Image (spheres, grey):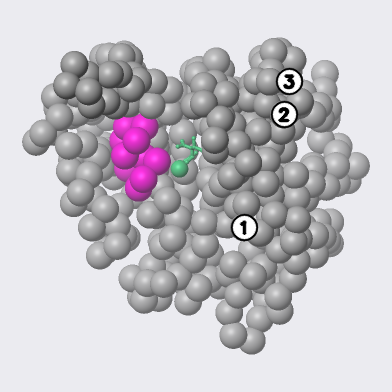
Amino acid sequence: MSKIIAVLSGDGIGPEIIAEAVKLLEVLQQSYGLDIQLEEGLIGGVATDATGKPLPDETLQLVKKADAVLLGAVGGPKWEPLPIAIRPEKGLLGLRSELGLFANLRPAILFPELADASTLKPEVVAGLDILIVRELTGGIYFGKPRGVRNLDNGEQQGFNTLVYDTHEIERIAKVGFESAMQRQRKLCSIDKANVLEATELWREIVIEVGKDYPEVQLSHMYVDNAAMQLVRQPKQFDVMVTNNMFGDILSDLASQLTGSIGMLPSASLDANGKGMYEPIHGSAPDIVGQNIANPLATILSVAMLLRYSLQQSELADKVENAVSKVLQSGLRTADIQQDGKTIVNTQEMGDAVVKSLVS
Ligand code: IPM
Ligand code: MG
C-alpha cells in the first residue's frame, strides 16, 4: 500500500523549497519505485488567510492519516500583528503537539566542500558531525500558566512556565542514548541545573536513564557553557540532548558552524517513528520569490523522511550522496557561495540533485 506523505509548504520560501523536494520525491517514485502518495495541505500564515486558523481541521486530519509529513516553513511579517493564538508559528507548534512529535533530531553536519563557507576557522569545523536531540512538545513552549496579566500597581506582567514531568524527560533521554549508540557513543545533556529546578530534575533523570546505557559516555553541561563550547571546540560533541528552548537556540548556533542554516534538515518523531520533516531554517521573508533560497536543507529532510518513516535507508543514502556530488561539482546557492564556485538558483540546485540521483 502506498505511504501517504502530507506536504505542507507553508509561508515565505516554503513553496519554493518544497517544490524542489517534491520534484525529487517524484523522481524516486518514477525511477526507484518508491510507493508514495503526496497530499497537500495548508499550514501557517497562508492557512490563517484562507481559513482563519494556522492549523485548519482539514490539515490536522491529513497529517493524522499520513505516514509522514514534509513541511516547508511558517511565518512572516504579514502575520506578526496577529494575536499569538492565530499566528503561523502556532500552526507548527500545534502540529508538533497534536502528533506527539516529542523527539526533534537536528544534525549539524559539515559537508567537507563547505569547510571554508563557515565563519569559523576550517580546522575548528572540518569533519563536524553533531546531532542535537531537542525535546519538542514540552518545556516552556507549552507550560502553563502562561500569558500577560495586569498587576495592581498598573504594570503588566508577562509569564511562562518551564515544566517537565518525569516521563517526558525519560523518553527524550532514551532517544539521546539510543542515538549515541548508533554514533560515537557520547552524550552530553545540556541544562541549567545550577539555577532552574526543572532542569535539575532533568539532570537526575538523564543520569537514571543512563544506567541502561553503560557503553555511552554521559556528560552534563550548563547551557551557557555549551553555547561557548560549540563555538570554541565544536568537535568535542557527538550527541547533545536538551529541552525545547535550549535546543531551539543551540541548534541555530550549531547550524552556523556548518556554513549555512540553509543546509540543515530535521526530523520530529513520535513514539512510533511517525515523523514530520522540515529544514531548520525559517520562511526567510527577505528573499521570498527570488528563486535564490537553498533547497538542500529540505532535500536532506526528504532523506531523513526516507530513513526514519519509510525505512528506505538505501534511498536516503542515495539522496545524501547526490547532494554531496552536487557540492563537489562546485554548484552553490547564494547562501553558501565561495570563490571560484558556480552560483545557481533554487530550481537549478534542485535539478542538479535530481540529475545526480538518476545518473
Ligand atoms: C524552530 C523554529 C520554531 C521554534 C518557531 C518557528 C516556532 O524556530 O523550529 O526552531 O521555535 O521551535
Ligand atoms: Mg528555531
The residue type indicated by label 2 comes to Asp
SS under mark 1: helix
The residue type indicated by label 1 comes to Asp
Depth order, front residue of 162/349:
162
Query: Residue lying furthest bottom in this view?
Result: 340
Q: Which residue is mark 1?
A: 286
Depth order, front residue of 269/32:
269
Q: Earlier in the sequence, mark 2 or mark 1?
A: 2
SS under mark 3: helix
Q: Which residue is mark 2?
A: 49
Specify start and end residues of the magenta stretch as a single range: 240-250
Distance from label 3 to label 1 (Cα)? 25 Å
Task: Give the residue at x 17% y 43%.
Answer: 222
Q: Which residue is mark 3?
A: 51
**Is residue 272 found left or right of 29 in the rendered image?**
left
The answer to whether the beta carbon of the residue marked 2 is less than 8 Å from any atom of ligand 1 is no
Would you say the residues marked 3 and 2 are in contact, meaning their CB atoms lie under 8 Å apart? no
The residue type indicated by label 3 comes to Thr
- Residue 113 showing in the rendered view: yes
For the N terminus, the image quarter is top right
Q: Residues within 10 Å of mark 3 (few under 14, many from 20)?
A: few
